[in-house]
Image: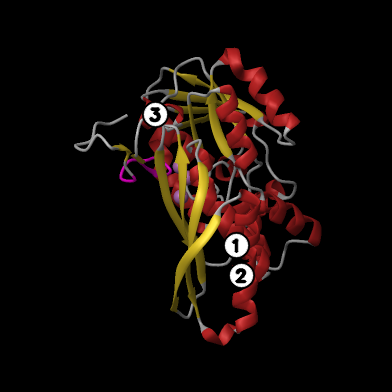
Amino acid sequence: MPQFQDPRLLVSGATMDDAGVYKLNEQQALVQTVDFFTPMVDDPYVFGQVAAANALSDIYAMGGRPLTALNIAAFDLDIGKEVIQRILAGGAVKLQEAGCLLVGGHTIEDKEPKYGLAVTGLVHPDKLITNAGAQPGARVVLTKPLGSGILSTALKGDLLDNEGLEELTAVMTELNDKASAVMQQVGVLAATDITGFGLLGHAWEICASSGVGMELQYGDIPVMDRVVDFASMGVIPAGAYKNKRYLEDKIEFSGVPEHGQIILCDPQTSGGLLIVVEESKLSELTGLLQAAGIDGSVIGTITDSKGLITVTG
Ligand code: CO
Ligand code: CO
Ligand code: CO
């Protein structure tokens, strides 16, 4: 972990980590994060749920427990009071599920609707989970299937059927709370949540912060049902290409099809946790995840090839 001037600042938001962490005392540290975005689904209630699950996720990724949240919103009053209420109700129901209290918020007028939250959580300073603790030989586990960017793009193009929309909604509205609790119970080396930089972008953050490399098995990486078809058809968000270009000299693909490479770079909304765990604790972690109703897929191994990710088909 980098050294900061002020010893109370355990993790700065200026690094690649998910949230800023401020040490209150020997037992408690505050975890703070903010996230908001434009709608990726038509249903305002679902959009509100996704925005809240996504904002809470950065607290869970660091092993924290969310305490309070503030709404951040921008609405054009023309969309109607009822739509705005549905968005906020979606956010509220997820906060309730998380046991996190809404303590206020701020709304401005804007043509393009935006919604999200600033969330404050608590973690024991010794149980803080960052990007920086991965060690060679440790295993890599992913807790949600990929493809929400691609499926959202298909939805915008009117190409996604109801079953596809249901799967997308279920994945994006699922809290990472149980996965986070399991990580804390087992004790893991590093973790982050998968969001805008895609699986490979966030995997690279762990590699860069920890000074290690990663080896991923393409066939073991979980993907939602219709994602491969859409990716093969070229239904791909611009952000996936942008991520792939940025990662060009950091990733080596061997035997991974073109559409697979782009799926691994697909920007995720409210994605799963990417967890690095010692080999000796792997079966305990996946077993407890399964007992909590989560499919923890073992997708790779940490290596000593500093800053390099290899993906094998
Ligand atoms: Co994050
Ligand atoms: Co974030
Ligand atoms: Co991250």
Q: Amino acid at mark 3?
A: Ala
Q: Nearer the viewer, residue 43 or 85?
A: 85
**Residue 270 % position (x, y):** 58, 50
**Label 1 neighbour load within 10 Å: few <14, some 14-19, many 20+:** many
Q: Are marks 3 and 2 in contact (CB under 8 Å)?
A: no
Q: Which residue is mark 3?
A: 132
Give residue 87's mark.
Answer: 2
**Residue 111 % position (x, y):** 47, 80
Q: How far is disc 3 from disc 1 in space, using C-alphas? A: 31 Å
Does residue 193 appear in this view?
Answer: no
Q: Nearer the viewer, residue 143 or 62?
A: 62
Describe the element under mark 2 as helix, strand or loop: helix
Quarter holding residue 31:
top left
Q: Mark 3 or 2 closer to N-term?
A: 2
Q: Amino acid at mark 2?
A: Ile
Q: Would residue 14 appear left or right of 129 to someone viewing this image? A: left
> What's drawn in magenta, residue-wise?
13-21
Q: Which residue is mark 1?
A: 91
Q: Is residue 140 above or below residue 82?
A: above
Q: Amino acid at mark 1?
A: Gly
